[in-house]
Amino acid sequence: TSHDAFNYFTRRYLSSFEEEQWESRFRAPEGLAPDGQLSSSDIYSLIAHLCSYQISVVFPESNVSQDSLKKIVSACKEKGLSVRISSRMLHADALGKKGSSADDYFKMMEHNLQVLKEEWSATP
């Protein structure tokens, strides 16, 4: 994802307690917090991780530029890995518009879970 807030989500819901390196499953190429800004070597490491694990979808966040994700997808394609950017955005710092599927905290969490579930199940 684009936002570093999802490292908490990853640690809580996508890793086991035995997994010591849960952080390797999460990187924020363009987060809003200072430690969310990755260096070029971090981005290279991220691309290598995507290629190594054949990850085929990355997730944009609703209020963060997709520029870094586009560069990462392009670099993966150069290495022979087809990666796509999810057409549905995740929400972290910004809720969805009033009346949307993510206009309060619980709806936002449900929205994010649904997007992840649908995108992962659509991945070959």
Image (tube, rainbow, N blue to C red):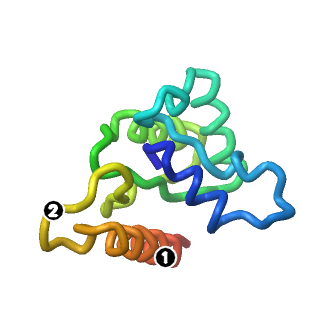
The number of discs equals: 2
**Label for residue 97?**
2
Residue at the image position 64 percent from the left and 63 percent from the top:
12
Do the residues under discs 2 and 1 have CB atoms within 8 angstroms? Answer: no
Residue neighbourhood size for the residue with mark 2, other residues' Cα within 10 Å, grouped as few (<14), some (14–19), many (≥20)? few
Q: Please name which of the two marks, 2 or 1, marks the residue nearer to the observer.
A: 2
Residue 96, percent from left and from top: 22, 62
- Along the polypeptide, which appears first: circle 2 or circle 1? 2
Query: In the rendered view, would you say 96 is above or below 21?
Result: below
Residue at the image position 34 percent from the left and 67 percent from the top:
105
Query: In the rendered view, would you say 19 is above or below 30?
Result: below
Location of the C terminus by quadrant is bottom right
Residue 65, percent from left and from top: 31, 38
Is residue 28 left or right of 99 when viewed as pictured? right
Element type where label 1 sits in the image:
helix
Asked where in the image residue 59 lies, by quadrant, the reply is: bottom left
Is residue 59 left or right of 11 when viewed as pictured? left
Is residue 64 left or right of 114 when viewed as pictured? left
Report which residue position mark 1 lands on: 117
Foreground pick, 109 / 72: 109
Element type where label 2 sits in the image:
loop
Asked where in the image residue 47 lies, by quadrant, the reply is: top right
Foreground pick, 115 / 67: 115
Outermost right residue: 18
Residue at the image position 57 percent from the left and 30 percent from the top:
43
